[in-house]
Image (cartoon, grey):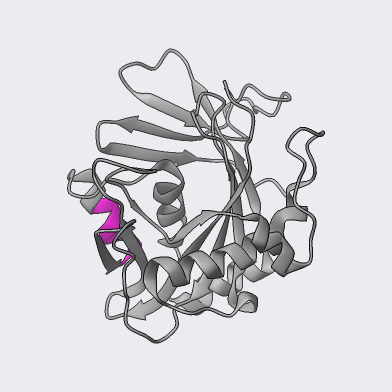
Amino acid sequence: MMTLVGTAATVVLLRDGAQGIEVLLLERPRHTGTFAGAWVFPGGRVDPEDYAAAGSVPPDLQAEPRHPELDLPAARIAGVRETVEETGLVLAPESLVELSCWIPPLQAPKRLRTWFFLAPAPAGEIRLNPGELIDSAWLTPAAALELHRLGKMLLVAPTFVTLTLLQQFPDAAAALGFAAAATPETFSSRLLDGYEPDAVIAWHGDEQYPADGAGQPGGRHRLVMRGSDWRYERNQAPAR
C-alpha cells in the first residue's frame, strides 16, 4: 500500500450544446502512460513551479499530512497549465470553480490527491498534445456514460461519478453556480471486499465504509463495477 505522493488537478470544461450541457473528454494512449486507453478530463500533477506561481509552499511529503485546501491555489495554477498543454485552450485561473477532491484507494499503485474544477470552455480550437493524447470529444454526460456502458469508451471511477452528477444540470451556468455555492466534497475511496466478480468502491456515508465510523446503517454511497456496466448508488446527502 502506498501513501499519498502528491497533488493533481483536473479541469472539467463545460459548454452548452444542442442536447444540453457538454464536457470535453480526452483519450489517453491505449498502451502506455497513466490511465492508458481511458477518456479523461484535462489535468495532471501539480509541479513545484505551480506552488511558486501561486505563492504557496509545497508540501513536505515526509512530514505530517496537511489540510488539502492548502494545495488549492497551486492546483488551480496546475489545472490552467495542464489544460493549455493538453488542449491548447487558455483559461483564467479565477474561472476555475472547485467541485470535489478525490483520494485514491489505499491499494492504488500511485496515489495523488486530485482536485476537480469546473470551468466554462473558452473559445478556440483544440490542439491535442500528441505525446499524451490521441483523440477528443465534446459529449453530454449521458452520452459519455452510455458509450462506457456499451464498451465503446473507457472511463475511470472519478470521471464516471462526475459525469453522473453533471447529468442533473440543464446547462453550464447551472453547474457552475451549484459548484460555486457548495463546499467541495471529498471522495476518499475504499475498495470493498466480498463482491467478486464485481468491484465496489465506497465513500463516506456508505454503510460499509470502513474509515472513522463514517458508515451509516442502510447508507449507500458506492460505485458498483461489473464489466462496463457500472452503477453509482447514493442515498445519503453529501457531507459538508
Nearer to us in this view, 32 or 36: 32
Q: How many marks?
A: 0
Q: Provide residue 91's location: percent of width, then percent of height.
A: 53, 78
Nearer to us in this view, 155 or 220: 155
Report which quarter residue 79 is drawn in. bottom right
Mostly what secondary structure, the magenta segment? Answer: helix
State left or right for residue 204 relative to residue 32: right
Q: Is residue 48 above or below residue 180?
A: above
State left or right for residue 41 relative to residue 119: left
Residue at (57%, 35%) from the top-left corner?
203
Residue at (62%, 75%) from the top-left corner?
93
Nearer to us in this view, 88 or 151: 88
Nearer to us in this view, 20 or 95: 95
Residue 170 can be seen in this image: no
Q: Is residue 1 above or below residue 149?
A: above
Was residue 141 drawn as part of the magenta stretch in this picture? yes
Was residue 153 drawn as part of the magenta stretch in this picture? no
Residue 201 can be seen in this image: yes
Q: Provide residue 22's location: percent of width, then percent of height.
A: 35, 71
Q: Provide residue 151's location: percent of width, then percent of height.
A: 18, 43
State left or right for residue 63 relative to residue 172: right
Residue at (46%, 72%) from the top-left corner?
84
Report which quarter residue 102 is drawn in. top right
Q: Provide residue 220's location: percent of width, then percent of height.
A: 53, 33
Quarter of the picture containing the N terminus is: top right
Report which quarter residue 157 is drawn in. top left
Give, as a single range, the part of the protein colored magenta: 139-146
Residue at (40%, 87%) from the top-left corner?
123
